[in-house]
Image (cartoon, rainbow, N blue to C red):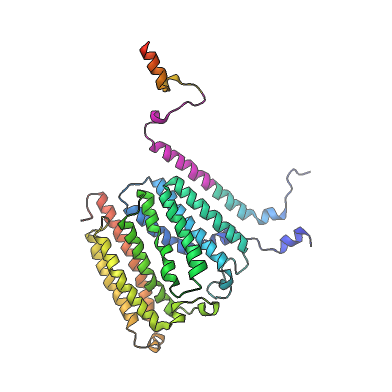
Amino acid sequence: MAIKVEHELHERRKGRNIGLLLLLIGFVGIVFGLTVVKVLQLGEAGKFERFDHVARPQLEPATQSTEGSE
Amino acid sequence: MTDASLQDTTYEASMGDYFALLKPRVMSLVVFTALAGLFVAPVPVHPFIAFVGILCIAVGAGASAALNMWWDADIDRIMKRTVGRPIPSGRVQPEEALAIGLALSGFSVVLLGLAANWLAAGLLAFTIFFYAVVYTIWLKRSTPQNIVIGGLSGALPPMIGWAVATGTVTVESALMVALIFMWTPPHFWSLAIFVKSDYGRAGVPMLTETHGRRVTRNHILGYMVALVPVSLAIAFTSIGGPIYLVTAVALNLWFGKACYDVWARASEDEAEADRFALERRAFKVSLAYLFLHFTALMAEAALRGVGFGGW
């Protein structure tokens, strides 16, 4: 038995479905492109670098000052 | 009747039918003038943000066109020029057009706000509202000045383009809006004189039908005269310059003469006899008039970029 049931409707709506797929791919491309452009416009990465699931003490100004005073 | 047999007899709208709802031809003028507004702005924009900004403006214009087709489906069914549109021809259901119009309106405004700034997004929202509600729902069927006031929505795209780049509204962007706003009446009415329309049958009060061609000719000349100072004033702002000034003077003489000829027609019989040759010419000149004005502004901006242009 076929896993996928084909219906005549699938064939009839093929053009619409492909069109919708292309629109969605375009939308993803726009969001990705905007993200890249906006992030790069922030300038030096160090200015907005933050913890990325792993603790990075060197990014914490308070830690640095404490170490310096000892 | 089963669901299957019902679907067999129903027309399935294609992507092309949905695209036709967005009035792609009108969209091209919107894209051109918005691009000009963005290009002449003194603040450089990243090309990708500029692309997304123009895309949002185009989609917003398309959304308002879909809302227009949804509301006007009843009169579109009556007029020959519009009977082939997606809704009157039965290819797209009215509810679909409404849903697409509302969804694309929200989508384009929010994306423009996120990509550029919220002033540009607000102006786009206002443009969509003005075209769909103020023009389509309110003015179109109530006054022969419909296209004059409604023309504001078609005039706003350069201001949105400018706002995408600068985040401000200035005298320069306001004058670009005024240029298209004052240009619309002589452009549209010169077309209305020679195109046989059935607006009257559909109950739409177009000036040619409510007041006749003589009054329309007077209005064409009147608006043309009012257009001249707007066109020339741009030359003396930060986006103008000698190239623009020379172009604007030449274009005003050219279009002014064409409008004068339309006004000076001795009789309607004469117009019928030469098959509205002067009115057709005025319409064609009007297209060149607007296109060349914005081209001259872009030329000034391009030259300014390499150390020339401007005053």
Percent of width and height locating residue B137 = 52, 67
In terms of depth relative to the viewer, which is nearer, A6 or B250? B250
Count the labels in the image.
0
B225 sits left or right of B189 in the view? left
In terms of depth relative to the viewer, which is nearer, B280 or B67? B67
Q: Residue B86's image quarter?
A: bottom right
State the residue lying farthest toward the top: A70
State the residue lying farthest toward the left: B311
Percent of width and height locating residue B72 = 55, 69
Task: Please check the rendered image and state whether residue A33 is part of the magenta-colored stretch, yes or no.
Answer: yes
Mark yes or no: residue B119 visible: yes
Task: Please check the rendered image and state whether residue B141 is part of the magenta-colored stretch, yes or no.
Answer: no
Is residue B247 placed above or below B35 in the rendered structure?
Answer: below
In terms of depth relative to the viewer, which is nearer, B283 or B61? B61
* Residue name at image x 35 percent, y 49 percent: B166
Is residue B27 placed above or below B259 in the rendered structure?
Answer: above
Is residue A40 placed above or below B118 in the rendered structure?
Answer: above
Magenta segment's dominant SS is helix
* Residue name at image x 64 percent, y 53 percent: A14
A12 sits left or right of B100 in the view? right
* Residue name at image x 63 percent, y 67 percent: B90
- Quadrant including the C terminus of chain B: bottom left
Mark yes or no: residue B287 visible: no
Percent of width and height locating residue B118 = 43, 48
Look at the image and give the residue range highlighted in magenta: A25-53
Percent of width and height locating residue A40 = 40, 36
